[in-house]
Amino acid sequence: MSLLRNPLLMLGINLSAIAGSTYLLRAHHVYNLEEHEARMDELEGTLRGHIGLIEEALDRLEGTATEADRGKKMNEYYGKRGRDEKTKK
């Protein structure tokens, strides 16, 4: 009987191929998730910084801002990113 016609060997080859491809796909998926999370964190910080700049400009237009307040809201919002986690009850 030929070695390649052995059903146990064929089953082992198939299972190892499935397991290997599953492992590689999972590793690739985890990598993509981490990259996506990093991009979203960067985007969140950028948006928070822009919101701070817009609010400062609005305060200057309304006449309620002082020179000492310049950059304060932007730094406050930008520094707050990633810290809006819900408190555990």
Image: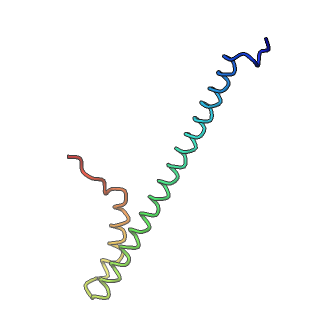
Q: Position of residue 37 (x, y in %)?
A: 47, 53
Residue nearest the viewer, comparing 25 with 60? 25
The structure residue drawn at horizontal position 33% and vertical position 78%, both measured from the top left corner, is 55
The structure residue drawn at horizontal position 50% and vertical position 49%, both measured from the top left corner, is 33
Residue nearest the viewer, comparing 39 with 8? 8
The structure residue drawn at horizontal position 28% and vertical position 82%, both measured from the top left corner, is 65
Classify 21 as above or below 70. Answer: above
Residue nearest the viewer, comparing 19 with 34? 19
Horizontal side of 37 relative to 79 (left or right) equals right
Classify 16 as above or below 67. Answer: above
Q: Position of residue 8 (x, y in %)?
A: 66, 16
Horizontal side of 35 relative to 55 (left or right) equals right
User: Where, by quadrant of the figure, is residue 10 drawn?
Assistant: top right
User: Where, by quadrant of the figure, is residue 84 drawn?
Assistant: bottom left
| Residue lying furthest right | 2
Classify 56 as above or below 85. Answer: below
Classify 55 as above or below 78. Answer: below
The structure residue drawn at horizontal position 41% and vertical position 69%, both measured from the top left corner, is 47
The N terminus is located in which quarter?
top right
| Residue lying furthest top | 1
Q: What sort of colour scheme is used for the picture?
A: rainbow
**How many numbered marks appear?**
0
Q: Position of residue 48 (x, y in %)?
A: 38, 68
Horizontal side of 32 relative to 69 (left or right) equals right
